[in-house]
Amino acid sequence: MMRTLFALVLVAAMCATVFGVGDDLYVNMTLLQNATAQGAVCLDGSPPAYYLHRGFDSGLSNWIVFLDGGGWCESISDCQGRKTTDKGSSKYMMNQTNFLGILHNTTKLNPDFYNWNKVWIGYCDGSSFTGDIDEVDPEKKLYFRGARIFKAVLDELWSQGMQNAKNAILSGTSAGGLATILNCDKFKFFFSSAVKVKCVANAGFFINANTISGTPNIHKKYQQVVDLHGSIKNLPPSCTSTMEPSLCFFPQNVISFIETPLFIINSAYDAWQINNTLVPSNLDPQHIWEHCKVRISNCTLSQRTTIKAFGVEFLKAFDGLTPCNTRGYFITSCHTHAQIVMPVYWFSTSSPRILNKTIAEAVGDWYFDRTGLHQYLDSYPFAKDC
């Protein structure tokens, strides 16, 4: 069954100044000061921030909005710790960030979307842009307002020209990839039916798997995130009405309720999930997994067997999704995490390929409806270093 699953290929504001050096594309940060009046603020109460690179030529009316990642905070102490980092405060975000992969502006590195307007939204709420609680934590002065940040930045982009969009993509990586899934339909509703809107989620398909000790750590984490941030009101009600709300944080449960076309890019052996969901550090006090977590080639036979079982469970999660001919997949066997803003994975001579397609080519074909093949699974029967 394992080989069959792997071999299967399913058919079915202001404009920022840009400084470039070689292939680098550096884009300045814009602080959205007026968002604070709406209560759209980071964990520490600072205003949200974004980076905008304007499109050009035929891409002037096309937009990619990219949601940054960086885990979640599920407790007051955890969120308090993020306040002194860029994941909890815009005060610590970089004044410039480098746009690569799907955000790059050359055909050499980004053949289909190089001339689109591109926006990177900073991630400083710890809830995958789902939190919304009016009250401020009285002792720690913490704000849980991720959903407000998402709306405030989109409203700002609307005034910056997005209201004239003909094509639009919501994308993101890791916690931002999950946010892309959870906010996909909301993004679609910003536009008229005449606009072609789709979502591309990278490394955001976190599965509800147990640890090597059999404990449901990731589910417990999501329960705490949803409760702490008040996320239930910003999860699809069609999902939360049928199951416990925190279960709707898992893509395997919520994707079937999403109506907007969605493309999922992930590894069946995602490095973050292997290193945190499956083998969290507190369950490896002797550091037996330390080298294995770095490179699959360092793993023992027993460890490889455990990881292989995780990959089987990951693929089984897709079996539960309702069939959908507008949904695309690109599932690799690479032991990696976050691929679409890394040129080596997105589009290069060394990029992972399935049926001779890079991730960039597969996403382009799907978005522009160039082929009837939109769903790819790597035929390699085990995790590999890429």
Image (cartoon, rainbow, N blue to C red):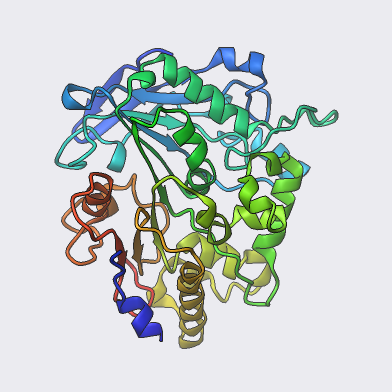
**Residue ID at (63%, 53%):** 239
Give the residue furthest to the right: 139
Q: Is residue 97 above or below residue 300?
A: above
Quarter of the image with the N terminus is bottom left
Percent coordinates x, y for residue 117 in the rendering: 30, 26
Q: Quadrant of the C terminus?
A: bottom left
Q: Residue at x 65, y 61 (%)?
A: 218
Q: Report x, y in % for residue 354.
A: 24, 66
Q: Nearer the viewer, residue 81 or 170?
A: 170
- Residue at image coords 72%, 57%: 244
Q: Depth check: give the residue in front, 233 or 45.
A: 233
The residue lying toward the viewer, choosing from 133 and 310, is 133
Against 369, is 220 above or below? below
Question: Residue 24 appears at what percent x and percent y?
Answer: 25, 34
User: Which quarter of the figure has residue 107?
Assistant: top left
Drawn side of residue 130 relative to residue 342, left or right? right
Q: Position of residue 155 (x, y in %)?
A: 50, 20
Residue 291 in view here: no
Counting labels gives: 0
Q: Nearer the viewer, residue 322 or 382?
A: 322
Q: In the drawing, does residue 280 fall left or right of residue 265?
A: right
Q: Is 286 placed above or below 16 here?
A: below
Q: Image check: 105 left or right of 117?
A: left
In this rendering, the answer to whether 25 lies above or below 157 is: below
Residue furthest out toward the front:
193
Camera sees residue 59:
yes
Q: Residue at x 30, y 64 (%)?
A: 12
